Amino acid sequence: MGQSMFRILLILLTLFPASLLAQPDTLWVRCYEGAYRCFDLKPYNESGFVWVGDIYTLENVNDFYMMITDSLGRQVFDRRLIDPGPYNDPDRMHSSASNFTISEVDSSFYLVGYFGSPADGAGLIARVSMEGDSLWMYRYGGLRANLGGSCSDDSGGIFVSGRTGELAEYGSIDGYLLNVDAEGEERWYRVYGGEATDAFSDMIRTQDGGFALVGKTSSFGGGGQFYLVKTDSLGEEEWSGAYGDSIDSDIAVAIGEMPDGGFVMAGWTYPEPMDMSTDMLVIRVDAEGEEIWRRYFGDNVNSETFHDLVVLENGDIVLLGETSNSPDDAVLIRLNPEGEVVWEVRYDIAWGIDCYALAYLSDGSYAFAGAANGRGRNGAFLARTEPDPANAVWDVDPSFPSLFTLHPAYPNPFNSTTSLRFDLPHSSHVSITLTDLTGRQVATLLEDRLTAGRHRLTWNAKDYPAGMYLCRLQAGSFATTRKMIIIK
C-alpha cells in the first residue's frame, strides 16, 4: 500500500470514531479591527484576558501590541511598544514571526517575539508593567535569531526558546534556550541541534523542573521532522528525538506534558513533496521520548494546521487549528490519551483566519484567538466557548473508585492556583499536607473525614514563594506524594 493511501486510511479512521460526545459551542466572538494580529492569549485577573501580537504601521512597520479585555472580550486597555532599532526601518524587507508569547511575572508582563527579515532579524524581549508602561526592551540571539516560546523562572526572570544563527554551534541554525533576569541581563544560553537547521517554536516547564522544547529539525533526515529536546533545569540536554516522516516536511509548534510525564506535540505536515496543502499532525511520546502514537487530520486538499494545545487533568488533549475549507475555518479537536477523538467542532469565525492561541478556563470552557483577514474583518479576534460537555463525564461516578489515587496537580507548574483530584475507594480520614524540599511542612490543605468517591480541591499559592513542593496524601494507612512547582 502506498504511503499516501496509508495516510488517508489513518485520517479516515481518526475522523470517524465509533461515538462522539457533544462539543462546546461558542458563547461569543469579538473581532478587533485594525492592522494587528494576536499570537498568544492568557487568562488575566480571574475573568479577563490578555493577549499579545504585532501591529503594522507605515511609519514603524511592526511593533509589539498587547490588549487586556474583560470577561466578554471588551477592550479594557491596549498598548503598542515601539522597537526603535534598525528592524523598524520601513525601507527594509521585513517579516514578523507568528509565535509571539506573553508571560505574567511579578506584577509585570514579558512579551517575546521576533522582528526583522529572515536574513538579519533579531529576537526581542520586552518587559511591561501591569499598567502598560514599558520597563525595557532588548535584543537577544544575534543575527538570524527568532524567539517564541517562553515561561517564567523562579526569581522574576524568564526562559525563552527559539533559534539562533549567529550563536549556532552545530549547524547553520540551531535551537536556542535563553534565561534572562528581571532586568533583562542574560544569565545563560544553550544551543541544540545537528548539522542542518534546527529551531524551537514552543516550550514548557516540566514536572521535574526541567524543560521540554519543541520545533522543527532538518538535521536528522529529509525535509523536516518534529524536534523534541528534554533538558534539566539549567538547560543541559537529557535526551532528544526527531519524529514524523523524514521524506515529508513536519513542523511542530505546540507541546504539552501528559500526566504520566510524557509529552504530546502538534503542528502540521506537507503530505506530498511540492504540495502546498497541509494536514494536521499530533504525536505522543512517553517520558523517555519513545513514540506511542501519531494522528493525522486532513483531506489532502485543504490546508489544515494545528497551532496550540492544552492537556486536561484527565490526560485528554484539546487542539486548536484552522482550515482553508471555509466557512467553518476554526477547528477544535479533543482526543483522549490514546489518541481517539472525543469530539471535533468547526466554527465559522471570519473568512481567512489563523488560529494561534488556546486557553482552558476555570469553568471548563475554552478561549482561543488569532488573526482574521477577510469578509470585511481585518485584525485580531478572540472567541470563548461554552463549558465543555465532555467534562461533565468527570463529575459522574457510576461506581466508586477501586483504588486510593492522588492525581497529578493541574496545572503544574503553576503561577497562583492549581487543582488537586484524589480518589477514595471507601470513607477515610484524609490529610493533605505540603512540605518544601527540606521536609519542612508549609501548609495543611485538608484534614477531614470524607466519603468514598472522587474529590477535588484548589490550592491558592499566591502567598507562597516560587519553588518545588511535595504534596502528601494520607488516607488511613495509604500514603502517596506528588511534586508541585510554583513559578512567579
Image (spheres, grey):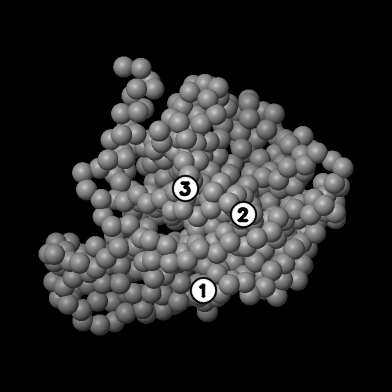
Answer yes or no: is residue 187 visible: no
Number of residues whose C-alpha sits closer than 10 Å to that of mark 1, classed few (under 14), some (14–19) or many (20 or more): some
Q: Is residue 151 left or right of residue 434?
A: right
Of the image marks 1 and 2, the number of the one nearer the N terminus? 1
- The residue singled out by tag 2 in the image is 376
Residue appearing at x 41%, y 79% in the figure: 443
Q: Nearer the viewer, mark 3 or mark 1?
A: 3
Compared to residue 124, the image places residue 453 above or below, namely: below
- Which residue is nearer to you in this view: 118 or 150? 118
Which residue corresponds to the image point at 63% horizontal and 25% vertical from the top-left?
195
The image quadrant that residue 6 belongs to is top left
- Residue 277 visible somewhere in the drawing: yes
Neighbour class for label 3 at 10 Å: few (<14), some, many (≥20)? some
Of the pair 361 and 78, the residue shown nearer to us: 78
Q: Is residue 129 above or below residue 374?
A: below
Q: Position of residue 359 (x, y in %)?
A: 48, 60
Along the horizontal axis of the image, is 425 left or right of 259? left
Q: Amino acid at mark 1?
A: Ser
SS of the residue at dot 2? loop
> Outermost residue toward the top?
1
Amino acid carrying mark 2 in the image: Gly
Q: Are marks 2 and 3 in contact (CB under 8 Å)?
A: no
Residue 106, located in which quarter of the rendered image? bottom right
Residue tagged by mark 1? 71
The amino acid marked with disc number 3 is Pro
Mark 3, residue position: 327
